[in-house]
Amino acid sequence: MTWSERLTELNIVLPKVVAPLASYVPAVQTGNLVYTSGQLPILGGELTVHGKVSEGAEGVVRPGEATEAARIAALNALAAIDGLVGIDSIKRIVKVVGYVASAPGFTGQPQVINGASNLLGEIFGEAGSHARAAVGVAELPLGAPVEVELIVEV
């Protein structure tokens, strides 16, 4: 089964590649590796959720919302790869780097980035097992709660 067929089986449609917000490209290939630029949870040209992630304060992004945002950001990263080399050329996911805009005291970054990691596992199975970093940061572009980048082997 190809990865395209797997996406269809899971009823997952890759979004259109998100246009860069500044001077960069969505993905680059060097040798047998593709690196994506950091991807935000953008759908239809709009950020799906804004703000810092926190468990207690009002007016912030809850961890569950941020986990879903990480999933969307990972889909955008896959779309960038698909646009460059085609999704079916992926041999394995090598590394995921996730950034979480964190309110003071929030330490659940690994659980938030599981939104991206679990999606990759659903799609790629064992080939989706990867190294990972989940980093808390003060701010992200456009006020996004998460940003995800991928390195894949093709």
Image (spheres, grey):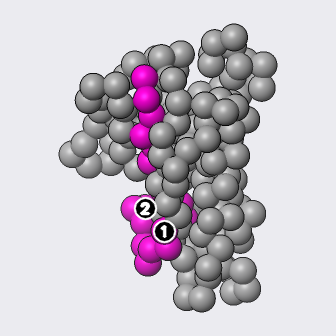
The C terminus, quarter of image? top left
Location of residue 9 with respect to 101 vertically, above or below? above
Mark 2 or 1: in front is 1
Residue drawn at the location 49% of the way across and 60% of the way down: 133
Residue 109: image location, x then y, percent? 60, 69
Q: Is residue 37 left or right of residue 98?
A: left
Residue 144: image location, x then y, percent? 50, 62
Q: Where does the magenta region start and end?
A: 135-154
The amino acid marked with disc number 1 is Val
Secondary structure beneath dot 1 equals: strand
- In this figure, which residue is indicated by the disc labeled 2? 142
Residue 129 figure quarter? top right
The reply to whether residue 39 is in sight is: no
Mark 2: few, some, or many residues within 10 Å (few <14, many ≥20)? few
Query: For residue 135, which numbered disc appears in the image?
Result: 1
Query: First in sequence: mark 2 or mark 1?
Result: 1
Query: For residue 84, which numbered disc appears in the image?
Result: none
Q: Is residue 32 left or right of residue 79?
A: left
Residue 89: image location, x then y, percent? 48, 17
Q: Is residue 110 left or right of residue 144?
A: right
Q: Kindly check if marks 2 and 1 are in contact, taking CB atoms under 8 A apart as contact.
A: no
Residue 152: image location, x then y, percent? 45, 34
Which residue is farthest left?
Answer: 23
Residue drawn at the location 25% of the way across and 42% of the way down: 24
Residue drawn at the location 52% of the way across and 36% of the way down: 93
The reply to whether residue 19 is in sight is: yes
The amino acid marked with disc number 2 is Leu
Is residue 74 rendered magenta in the image? Answer: no
